Amino acid sequence: QVQLVESGGGSVQAGGSLRLSCAASGPLFMRYCMGWFRQAPGKEREGVARIFTLSGNTFYADSVKGRFTISQDNAKNTMFLQMDSLRPEDTALYYCAAAKNCGMFQASGFGYWGQGTQVTVSS
């Protein structure tokens, strides 16, 4: 069983930075693909960034490319999302997610989820 616990959310002004963390436990083969998703009120959950655990290959949504950086620790038990140049439209509940493989980058492809951490960016 995979368990995911996010931390690091908070409130920041536009242009500021936040770093999210996701502590993962459970068999590594069940979380070869790790990702960050976000959901704003009234909107669908959208993929932000993902990382292939074994190779470290990454993928970003166009909306965050160049501003957000996804990474993991050497033990592959903690995933991070460094968020710079934050904008009000980045305000959302951010979720950590895990899957056995990296297919289409959409929420339905991930079977394990954290509880979410709120990120609020004010203008």
Image (tube, rainbow, N blue to C red):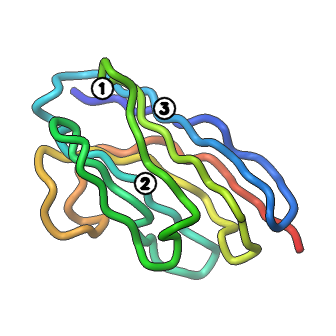
Cα separation, mark 2 vs mark 3, equals: 12 Å
Q: Which mark is residue 76?
A: 1
Check disc 1 and give the amino acid type.
Lys
Tell whether 15 sits left or right of 100: right
Mark 2 = which residue?
A: 36
Q: Residue at x 16, y 23 (%)?
A: 27
Q: How many marks?
A: 3
Query: Are discs 3 and 1 less than 8 Å apart at CB?
Result: no
Q: In terms of sequence position, does the residue under pointer 3 or pointer 1 come before the other?
A: 3
Q: Quadrant of residue 54?
A: top left
Q: Quadrant of residue 34?
A: top left
Most foreground residue, 102 or 4: 102
Graded by Cα atoms within 10 Å as few (under 14), some (14 to 19) or many (20 or more), the crowding at tag 1 reads: some
Tell me residue 1's x, y (percent): 21, 26
Most foreground residue, 117 or 8: 8
Tell me residue 91's x, y (percent): 69, 67
